[in-house]
Image (cartoon, rainbow, N blue to C red):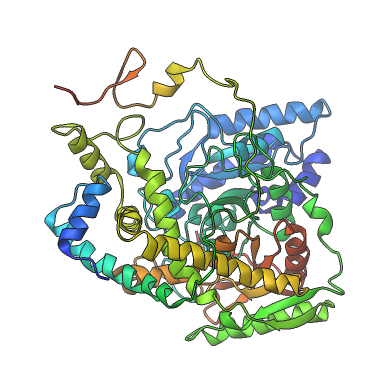
Amino acid sequence: MTELTSLTIAEAREKLEAGEFTSVELTEAYLSAIDAANSVFNAYVAVTPEKALDMAKASDARRASGQVGALEGIPLGIKDLFATRDVHTQACSHILDGFKPKYESTVTQNLWNDGAVMLGKLNMDEFAMGSSNETSHYGAVVNPWRANGSNQQLVPGGSSGGSAAAVSAFLCAGATATDTGGSIRQPAAFTGTVGIKPTYGRCSRWGTVAFASSLDQAGPIARDVRDAAIMLRSMASVDAKDTTSVDLPVPDYEASLGQSLKGMKIGIPKEYRVEGMPEEIEKLWAQGIAWLKDAGAEIVDITLPHTKYALPAYYIVAPAEASSNLARYDGVRYGLRVDGKDIVDMYEKTRAAGFGTEVKRRIMIGTYVLSAGYYDAYYLQAQKVRTLIKRDFEIVFDAGVDAILTPATPSSAFGIADEDLASDPVKMYLNDIFTVTVNMAGLPGIAVPAGLDAKGLPLGLQLIGKPFEEETLFRTAHVIEQAAGRFTPAKWW
Amino acid sequence: MSVDLATVKRVARLARIAVTEEDANRMVGELNGIINFVEQLSEVDVTGVEPMTSVTPMDMRKRADNVTDGDKAADIVVNAPSTDHNFFLVPKVVE
């Protein structure tokens, strides 16, 4: 039974279709894997076995009647940021204690419409603010990967750490995730999985707990490039309930896999060669370049001069939007309430008790940069720099570059409760140095595993594409995957 | 620019987050660290640059001004900590 959980979505799809097993059997295999291992990883904050089996039975019945959706019978994990009707939805925050929405997010509804089965809700950094999944109210997630000969527990990255760990440890066939500054791509890179943040507007944000509305995008984390392509096709849609969702047809991303790279131009930005970058990452990047060249792509050196300003601009724009979005958590309409002597005292005590340290820090920064006297110096300046960051990309794409290849992260996974990172928030923020530019410019980016470092931990490469050209990313990432192979952790649990 | 203890307390008040003296003192250092980090943006020449308002150039989609949802008061109050007859209850605000 256990080997059912090692199948990719594409493999499971084929075997379900051939009648080798049912969705109920596949779902039961995942539920017992979760039962056996979730206490080790802390990847799920809520498991929904009854709902999963009901959905699986309904899926098997649909299949018997000849009705087969694109994800028919496939068991998935859902990041706790997505609203799921009558099921735990708390963005892994204490302030949303007990919240069970009476509505479903558009992204998850799209998955259920295509026949998928929900296994439960996945751990994440509180309100998606973090790069290690350590800010969750439900505690840290453990990475299924360990360094050679070491028992040290490593982080799976964040904020979608539960999603990445669950996919990597075979506790779901694929998972939904979200990415505001790197929260899909960094955890994917840390766990040897594939994660894509599509173009801003490709997936509806309706029913996804908001962090920074101009940057947030949903996307999948999956075992391989094909599975990510299958999942994104179902997740993406135009939606009347999100006016920033884009009315463009959703392509069959899977069809772009296996297409030749001949005639494609891949840009290599010199600004991503940062000081102090480990030699292994340099080597990995050079290897990626060689693979794409071998596949027929033309490699060109490019410049994105405002790259170094993307992270500081992000740490103004994202907290500013967060401070506004999180104003709604006031102890009145949902979640936690701590009584006070008057209404303001109640608000202040509720928010003090309900938000964790990192979330408070970002609300404070956001409130400060938007406050009278500082708005022009910080927020307006950051929004102008953002225009320049986007322009850098436009110039490169106008010159004929089809996609950009960079490392995904500046290091492999680090230890849980790393003292060096805990003592300085800015050091933790630097994890997103290669991914954050993509959110600032609204572009699509994919992280694909490309090798292991000397410690035996996975490292990823990132491909950045033109707006709404996710197909180019899947096609190119697939070439890297074919050359690099797939990476799965040695089972120690 | 740097943030002092009084500023931290003022911002916490604006953000409606109660802070202890200890929290506030710790935040002075942390917020200054972040403010110093973002300070480098001031060296960018932004003469004639428009601030970004939307990453994708698009007109906001509009729809006819009709009621499309409603009649679900029970659903709306179901998650509230304190309600009465489909009203949210809060501490007294008017004497």
Instruction: Decide if residue B28 is on the left or right side of residue A407.
Output: left
Q: Position of residue A118 (x, y in %)?
A: 59, 38
Residue at image position (51%, 36%) is: A83
Residue at image position (31%, 54%) is: A371
Give the camera-side residue of A199 and A381.
Answer: A381
Q: Position of residue A76 (x, y in %)?
A: 61, 44
Furthest residue toward front: B48
Instruction: Decide if residue A407 is on the left or right side of residue A136.
Output: right
Instruction: Decide if residue A420 is on the left or right side of residue B90.
Output: right
Give the camera-side residue of A272 and A391.
Answer: A391
Q: Position of residue B14 (x, y in %)?
A: 25, 48
Residue at image position (56%, 58%) is: A184
Write down the quadrant of residue A300 in the picture: bottom right
Q: Is residue A389 visible?
A: yes
Above or below: residue A458 compared with residue B81: below
Give the camera-side residue of A233 and B49.
Answer: B49
